[in-house]
Structures are given as C-alpha cells and as structure tokens.
Image (cartoon, helix red, strand yellow):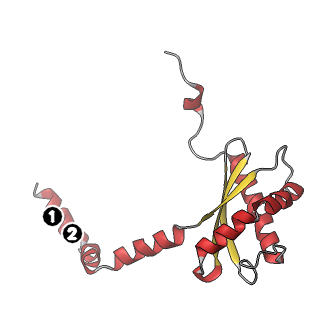
Amino acid sequence: MKRNRSDDRPHGPSQRQLRVGEEIRHVLVEVLARGDLRDPELQGVSITVTEVRMSPDLKHGTAYVMPLGGGNIAVVVKALKRAARFLRGEVARAVRLRVAPEITFAADRSFEEAGRIEAALRRPEVQRDLATPKAESDDGAKGR
C-alpha cells in the first residue's frame, strides 16, 4: 500500500507557522500602539491583536483583533483592512521573510464564545447537573 506524504505530517500549525505568527502579532501590536495609522476610525481606539494564524507557506496571515472594551468591532476590522497595505510594509521591515505575507483582519469571536459557554454553565438545570453527587451518578450506572 502506498502511503501519502500528507499522512506523515502533524495536523495543525507547524512550529515555524506559530513562531512567525507570533512575531507578526508583536509587530502589529507595536504599530497599533504607536498610533501610526491615520484612519480617523482608528484614532484613539486601543486594539488587541489576540492571534495571527499563518498559512503553511507563510504567504498569508489572518490577524484576529478586538477593540479594547469590545467597541464597534466591525468598524475597526473594516478600517484595518483599509490599512492592510501599510501594515504589510511595516511587517516586511520588521520580520525577516522571503515574501512579505498578505495580512487579513478578522474579529476575534473567542470572547463571545467564552461568554456563551459561561452563561450556559450558569443556567439552573446545568448547575443542578453539576451539583449531583458522584456516588449518585455511579449508582445509576451500576443499575443498567
């Protein structure tokens, strides 16, 4: 049986993708903190870059962002997309890669997801299930 090379590769990002993504995240954070962007919709807005995910060939990256305090995220993402060319140049100067990666911006929805999970865990029926003593649940399993 012939094996496919892709079967030997680990699933998920490589160490290099993670390292480059983190370097780019640091550069973006620094540029955004300096306030070098002239877009009026970004003036006075603190933006958190939570993660940068790189493609396997390191030519494309997605930066997940969130305005501090959750502000109008759609406006911020749209403004960052307009500034992507400038930000790509800043990244190219700071990170040593053969090709400056294209950077796209996306809203980081992980905070919303965490809030939904927390709200679900606080529901009375879930609290009741979580409070059920271990011995009671073991007895129910033995009766089957």
* In the depicted structure, whether residue 39 falls above or below residue 106: below
Query: What's the CA distance linking mark 1 and mark 2?
Result: 6 Å
Residue at position x 69%, y 53% from top? 61
Is the C terminus in the top left, top right, bottom left or bottom right quadrant? bottom left
Residue at position x 76%, y 70% from top? 29
**Closest to the observer: 12 or 53?**
53
Query: Which picture quadrant has residue 83?
Result: bottom right
* In the depicted structure, whether residue 103 falls above or below residue 110: above
Does residue 107 appear left or right of residue 113 in this picture?
right
At which x and y percent is residue 75? 63, 74
User: Dot 1 surroundings within 10 Å: few (below 14), some, or many (20 or more)?
Assistant: few
At which x and y percent is residue 125? 24, 76
**Closest to the observer: 3 or 34?**
34
* In the depicted structure, whether residue 134 falls above or below residue 119: above
Residue projecting furthest to the left? 143
Q: For numbered disc 1, what is the local secondary structure?
A: helix
Does residue 120 appear left or right of residue 48 in this picture?
left
Query: Which picture quadrant has residue 122?
Result: bottom left
* Disc marking residue 139: 1
Question: Are the residues tagged 1 and 2 within 8 Å (C-beta)?
Answer: yes
Q: For numbered disc 2, what is the local secondary structure?
A: helix
At which x and y percent is residue 50? 65, 67
**Closest to the observer: 15 or 135?**
15
Does residue 8 appear left or right of residue 92 in this picture?
left
At which x and y percent is residue 48? 68, 73
Residue projecting furthest to the top? 1
For disc 2, the marked residue is 135
